[in-house]
Image (cartoon, rainbow, N blue to C red):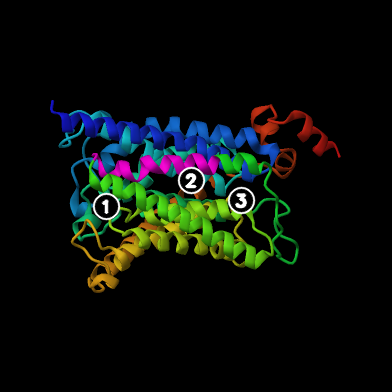
Amino acid sequence: MDATYLINTLWVLVAGVLVFFMQAGFALLEAGLTRPKNTINILAKNTLDFGFAIAAYALLGFGIMYGTSGPGGLFGTSLFLSPLKGFEIEGLSPEVFYFFQLVFAGATATIVSGAMAERTKFMSYIVYSFFISLIIYPVSGHWIWGGGWLSDIGFMDFAGSTAVHSAGGWVALAGAMIVGPRLGKYSKEGKARAIPAGNIFMATLGMFILWLGWYGFNPGSELGFDEVTIHTVVTTTMAAGGGMLASLVVTWKRYGKPDLSMVLNGILGGLVAVTSGCPYFSFWVSFLIGVLGGILVIFSVEFIDRKLKIDDPVGAISVHGVCGALGTLCIGLFASVNTDAKGLFYGGGFSQLGIQALGVVVVFAWTFGAGFLLFKIIKKTIGLRVEKEEEIIGLDIVEHGAEAYPDFVSQERDA
C-alpha cells in the first residue's frame, strides 16, 4: 500500500465527511427559510432522507450508477445488493469511493425537500426520497459518471452541477408543481405574497455549513490530492464570492434594500454554477460564473414565483436546477485549463457547448419526467399533501406531535 494510495484515500474520506455535513446545512437553511410551526418537520426530513438514501443506494442505486453498463449505456447491470463485491477503483479504496458517492446521493434527495416544504405529508416524503436515491439519481448519474452514453460522447460535469444539483432541482420542480402552493401564498387575483423566513440566523448558518461542505464536494471529486484539487478549492471560493457580491448589488438595486435571504441563495447559486467545471475554469472566469449564478438565481426565483405561480419556499429549483444548468453550459463556453476540451471563448468551437446543452436537456427530461410520474403515483395512492386544517396548525404538531418553539408557535396560533 503506497503513500499516494493512502493520501488519496484519506483526502476523499475527509471530503466525503464534509459532503455529509452538508445535510446539516440543508436542514438549517430550509428550517430557517420556512415558518417556525414546521421546523421539526423540516429537520426530520433532512435527517431521515439520508438514512433512506443509505438503504436505497446499497440495494440498487450504486449498481445502477456504477455497475457494468447495459445496452445503450442507459444504466448499470451489476453490483446490486452487494455493491462492493468485486468493485475496484484504481488508486483509491473502493469503500471510500462508495461512501463518497453515497453522500452525493443523499444530497440530491435533500434538495427536493425545501421546494415542497410546509405542505407535504411526511410518509409521502419518505417514499419519494427513497426512490430518488434508488433509481432517479443513479440512472442519470450512470450516463454522466458511470460509463454511460453521455460520458461516451464527451459530456463533462466534474462535480455535479447537472448530475447532482440539476437532478435534484428538476425533481423539486415536478414536486412543487404537483403538491401546489402553500395556503395564502397567492391572492385570488394570482398575485404572489411573501411568506417571511422564520429564522434568518438559522438560514445563514446553514448557508455557511453548505459553503464549507463544498470544499469536500468539489475538490473531493478529483478522487485524489494533487494540484487540480488545490485549483478547485480556489475556483470554488471565487465563484462563491462572485455570487455573493452580484446578488447583493442586484437585490439592493431592485428592492431598495439588501435582501439577506436572496444573498444567501446568490452565494449558493454561484457555488452550484461553478461545480461542473471547477477544475477547468480559470481564476477570474470562476468569479464571473459566480456572478452569473448570483444574478440568475434572483430572476429565476422571481419568474418561478410570480409568473409560473410555483411556490418554492427556499428557492431550491432556481439555486440547484437553473444554476446547475448554467454552470454545465459554461464548460462549453469557458473551459480552458486542465482539459483538452476548450470552451467556445478559448477556441474550442461549438462542439463542446452542444454536447453540454444536450446533457442538460436529457437530464432534465429524465429527472423531471420520472419525478412527475412518481409524485402523481404518490398523490393518487397515499396522498401527497396534508389537509388544509393540518397545514394551518403546522406540520410539527400534526406529523410529529411536538413543537420546536412551543411558547412562540402556540401564542401565534392562538392569536
Residue located 41% across and 57% down the image: 273
Give the CA separation, mark 2 to mark 3. 12 Å
Crowding near pointer 2: few (<14 within 10 Å), some, many (20+)? many
| Amino acid type of the residue tagged 2 in the rendering | Ile
Q: Name the spot of residue 25 as percent of width and height, x first.
A: 51, 39
Label 3 or label 1, whichever comes before in sequence order: 1
Q: Name the spot of residue 102 as percent of width and height, x first.
A: 35, 35
- Foreground pick, 80 / 212: 212
Q: Name the spot of residue 84 as percent of width and height, x first.
A: 23, 29
- Foreground pick, 140 / 254: 254
Tell me: 289 left or right of 90. right
| Amino acid type of the residue tagged 3 in the rendering | Pro
- Foreground pick, 384 / 89: 89
Q: Which residue is mark 3?
A: 313
**Hey, which quadrant is residue 37 in on the image?**
top right
Q: Which residues are magenta?
A: 206-225
Residue located 15% across and 37% down the image: 90
Tell me: 380 left or right of 68. right
Q: Which residue is mark 2?
A: 111
Crowding near pointer 3: few (<14 within 10 Å), some, many (20+)? many
Residue located 50% across and 60% down the image: 294
